[in-house]
Image: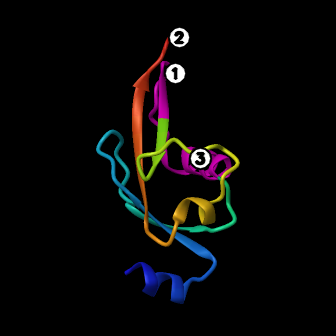
Amino acid sequence: MYKQLKKKHPNKSPVVLDTSHIEIKQKKFLIDSDMNVAEFIQHFKQKYVQNIKKNQALVFLFNNNLEPMNRTFTQIENNNLIHLNILVEDTFG
């Protein structure tokens, strides 16, 4: 599946959402490979997450790793699908 997607969309990185912590209908994404983690999180939160409380934080794990904000999806991808897990954590405030 990964190779077929990369052949058809060479400048995109396939991302699969693996989470039950927040309700999002779309579970598969094709992300620009040169987009970094910070840009993706900002776009994702604006478009898909509206019902987060002020005392909650979202934690984005890419392939079960907490990635640096300046890392691009090409660097995360490593010739495989990217599995994204989003956790909701309670914070102070």
Residue 91 percent coordinates (x, y): 47, 17
Residue located farthest toward the top when viewing the structure as drawn: 93
Instruction: State which tag comes first along the sequence, 2 or 3.
Output: 3
Q: Secondary structure at mark 3?
A: helix
Residue 12 percent coordinates (x, y): 59, 74
* Residue drawn at 34 percent across, 53 percent down: 18
| Magenta span of residues | 37-58
Nearer to the camera, 73 or 75: 75
Left or right relative to 22: residue 5: right
Residue where numbered disc 2 is placed: 93
Placement of the N terminus among the 4 image quadrants? bottom left
Above or below for 92 versus 64:
above
Amino acid identity at mark 1: Lys
Q: Secondary structure at mark 2?
A: loop
Residue where numbered disc 1 is placed: 54
Amino acid identity at mark 3: Ile
Instruction: State which tag comes first along the sequence, 1 or 3.
Output: 3
Residue located farthest toward the front when viewing the structure as drawn: 78
* Residue drawn at 46 percent across, 31 percent down: 52
Q: Are discs 1 and 2 less than 8 Å apart at CB?
A: yes
Magenta run includes residue 30 = no
Above or below for 77 versus 3:
above
Above or below for 27 versus 71:
below
What mark, if any, has residue 41 been given in the picture?
3
Residue 89 percent coordinates (x, y): 41, 26
Residue 25 percent coordinates (x, y): 35, 57
Question: Which of the two marks, 1 or 3, is nearer to us in this view?
Answer: 3
